[in-house]
Amino acid sequence: MLAPKPDRLPPPAAHGIAVAGELSRPTGLGEGARLMRAGLDQLGIANWGQDVGDRLPGGQADRLPFEPPPPGALLVLHENPPSLPWALLRLPRDLIRQRHVVGYWAWELPVAPPAWRAGLRFVHSVWVPSRFTADALRPLLPADGRIALHIVPHPVAASPPVPSQLDRAAFGLPQDVVIVLVSASLASSFTRKNPLAAIAAFRAAFGDRPDRLLLLKLNHADHFPDDLAAIQAAVADAPNIRIEPRILPFADRHALTACADILLSLHRSEGFGLVLAEAMLLGIPLVATGWSGNMDFMDDKAASLVDFRLIPARDPRGVLQLPGAVWAEPSIADAAQRLRALADDPSARRALGAAGASMAHAKLGTAPLASAIQALGL
């Protein structure tokens, strides 16, 4: 009720694009906003950042400076409907006036919460990162077509990951083993990321073999002690499984990914799959669940896709749980077989990594972003 609303009929987009979001936070939405600015830079489109990273619950104090956009510049809000009014209340109240407003929204189930319809009163258009998310949100949009929906994948290839100089020795990792990396934030739903299945698949594939190492890169583990305890119980005393709980700078995180021989993701659903896209651009071969948003930029030639069956989505936190919602239950046995095949064949790993990098560069450039911008007349 208090948050400012945009003009009912927006003026034509002009001058450039203002990108608002969690620009200073290490979140998926924050990274999406940063990647959009990098894509706009590559397209030569003037853009301005509006950081709400310190103004949302759990925010940090090091907010980036506000960059006032000129009148008429398109405004893209990288905030999902539940936090969108909160963000608008903490931005200048006239920011939303006299400009076309786009909501860039991400979601990880094949159906979206009906309450998200309330967010439509704050936007003129909706952009999403994948066909999977588009299919979930489309039923919420007005039937008269007044709110356009565009699929705009994160232009990861416009700002590909650049690893720091850290190597295996710097991370305390052995040189003579095949490293399988699982990288997940426990804040992104422990059940959805499904690290317990990854542990089970690794152990089924390799047991306690000393020449195979599972590295669990877990962000925000200290905020979810019960989840961390479940992971530690599953690891038990396995000598070839390590947990890396530190929050690393982006370049060091990419360096850690580059140290891996295989990236494993037995996710139950992904709205996009940013970690997977980054690994592909680094040439790391993937063993990943063959379902949801990641299928926009991979196929069975660019990744080793794990079989699955669809089951009702059950999220103990209650966030990703809606009537009729399903997600994937990946096959641990199939994942174990695929891990063994890649671990035993260096040439197959190189070929799959190269194919993945090629597809990620082809699919995740700036062309979809340029098309969506042109559709709005800019």
Image (cartoon, rainbow, N blue to C red):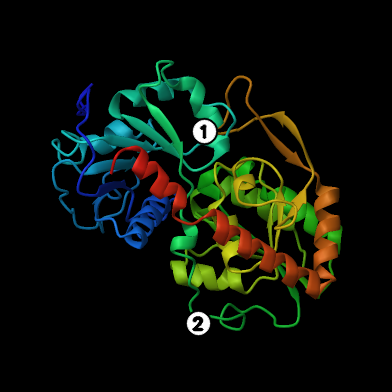
Residue at horizontal 86 percent and vertical 49 percent from the top: 333
Q: Where residue 134 is drawn, which disc sits there?
A: 1
Q: List x then y, in percent, for residue 143.
A: 44, 15
Percent x, y of residue 313: 65, 30
Residue 29 is at least partly visible in this image: no
When the figure is inspected, residue 60 is found, relative to residue 132, above or below; the finding is below
Nearer the observer, 365 or 290: 365
Q: Can you say whether 231 is above or below 339 in the image?
A: above
Q: Tell me the residue at 14%/36% (across/down).
A: 93
From this viewpoint, is residue 253 visible? yes
Q: As drawn, which residue projects farthest toward the top?
A: 143
Specify the quadrant of the image occupied by residue 285: bottom right
Tell me the element at label 1. Answer: helix
Nearer to us in this view, 151 or 108: 151
Q: Quadrant of the C terminus?
A: top left
Q: Amino acid at mark 1?
A: Ala
Residue 335 placement (x, y as % from top left): 80, 52
Q: Identify the mark nearer the N-term, 2 or 1.
A: 1
- Does residue 203 appear left or right of residue 250 in this picture? right
Q: Position of residue 293 (x, y in %)?
A: 59, 42
In three-dimensional space, the C-alpha distance between marks 2 and 1, rounded to whole angstroms, equals 38 Å
Q: Which residue is mark 2?
A: 165
